[in-house]
Amino acid sequence: MFNMKRKILFSLLFFFFVLKTNAQCAMCRAVLESGDDQSMAEGINDGIVFLMAVPYILIGTIGYIIYRKFNKSNKIEKIE
C-alpha cells in the first residue's frame, strides 16, 4: 500500500515538474529560428510538448484502471 502511494506521488511530481524541453522537429526549428519573433517559437514548442504529453497521460490512466481492476479481483479471490 505504501509502495503504491509512493509510486503515485512520484508520477504526479514527474508530470508537474518537467524540465524545459525542445520538442520541435528540425524543419520547424529552422523556420522559426530564422524569424525575429522568438515568442512564437516558444509558443509552438510548448504546444508540441502539450500535444505529446496528453496521449501518455491517457494511456497511463487506462493502464492504472486496468491494474486496479485486476488487482481488486485478486484480493476478492484471496478472501473467499
Image: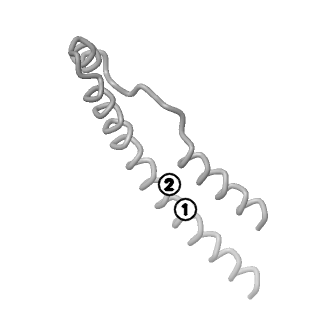
* Quarter of the image with the N terminus in it: bottom right
Quadrant for residue 48, please give it: top left
Mark 2 residue type: Gly
- Give 30 or 5, whichever is nearer the viewer: 30
Quadrant for residue 64, please give it: bottom right
How are the residues colored? one colour
Could you say which disc has been placed on residue 64 in the image? 1
Residue located 64% across and 58% down the image: 8
Q: Residues within 10 Å of mark 2 (few under 14, many from 20)?
A: few
Could you say which disc has been placed on residue 60 in the image? 2
Q: Secondary structure at mark 2?
A: helix
Quadrant for residue 74, please give it: bottom right
Q: Secondary structure at mark 1?
A: helix
Query: Does residue 62 appear to the left or right of 11 in the view shown?
Result: left
> Are circles 1 and 2 on residues that touch, CB within 8 Å?
yes
Question: In the rendered picture of this protein, how many numbered marks are placed on residues?
Answer: 2
Which percent across, then down, holds residue 7? 68, 55
Q: Residues within 10 Å of mark 1 (few under 14, many from 20)?
A: few
Residue located 46% across and 61% down the image: 62
Residue located 38% across and 48% down the image: 55
